[in-house]
Amino acid sequence: MKVHFTDRLEIRSAEAKDGSAVWQLVKEAGTLDVNSPYCYIMLCDIFRDTCAAAVIGEELVGFMSGYRRPDRPDTLFIWQVAVHRKARGRGIAKAMLNELLNREEQQAVKYVEATIGPANTASRRLFSGFAADKGAQCRITEKYGPELFPSGASHEPELMFRIGPMRREETRI
């Protein structure tokens, strides 16, 4: 990866053509469950309104996938957040989250949710910090215990972070 940080960061909706690079980014992150390349192509295509791609120059340096919950249309669930190692610590994940929430399609969102493993300090900081920035409550509860994962799969529990309610003007950057 040849990222030149003098190039401008662009955050945009994901596109189907980003799927392969997203798969590679998630794989190299080393901290996320890697899904199939097809899954990322589909996310970037069908769920582009709730997925963000962060690009510097021609290089994909960040990806955030999410979807609006069918049972709670006012809730945006963030599924995965990946930022390339060379681009971490620059606020890219928070910028992607803000960009997602500023989209016209997300006008009705009042809550943001994400499940995060207890050891994932970067994501815990991202979502706790986002809540603090917005002056919104952040409730943390256990969502998926390790007993739900397949036998032999080493997986820590997933904690649900639920942020909100947020007023529309609070989501502006």
Image (cartoon, rainbow, N blue to C red):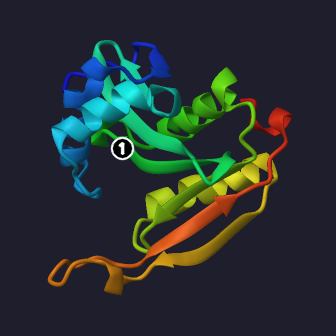
Q: In which quadrant will I find the N terminus?
A: top left
The vertical placement of 115 against 12, above or below, is: below
Query: Which residue is tagged 1?
Result: 82
Q: Is residue 122 left or right of residue 99?
A: left
The vertical placement of 16 against 116, above or below, is: above
Write the residue at 19% across / 77% down.
153
Q: Is residue 81 left or right of residue 42?
A: right
Q: Amino acid type of disc 1?
A: Ala
Secondary structure state at the residue bearing disc 1: strand
The vertical placement of 15 against 50, above or below, is: above
Image coords of residue 118 (percent x, y): 45, 74
Image coords of residue 47 (percent x, y): 44, 32
Front residue of this view, candidates 16 and 4? 16
The vertical placement of 169 against 80, above or below, is: above
Write the residue at 42% across / 70% down.
117
Image coords of residue 157 (percent x, y): 40, 78
Write the residue at 37% across / 19% down.
56
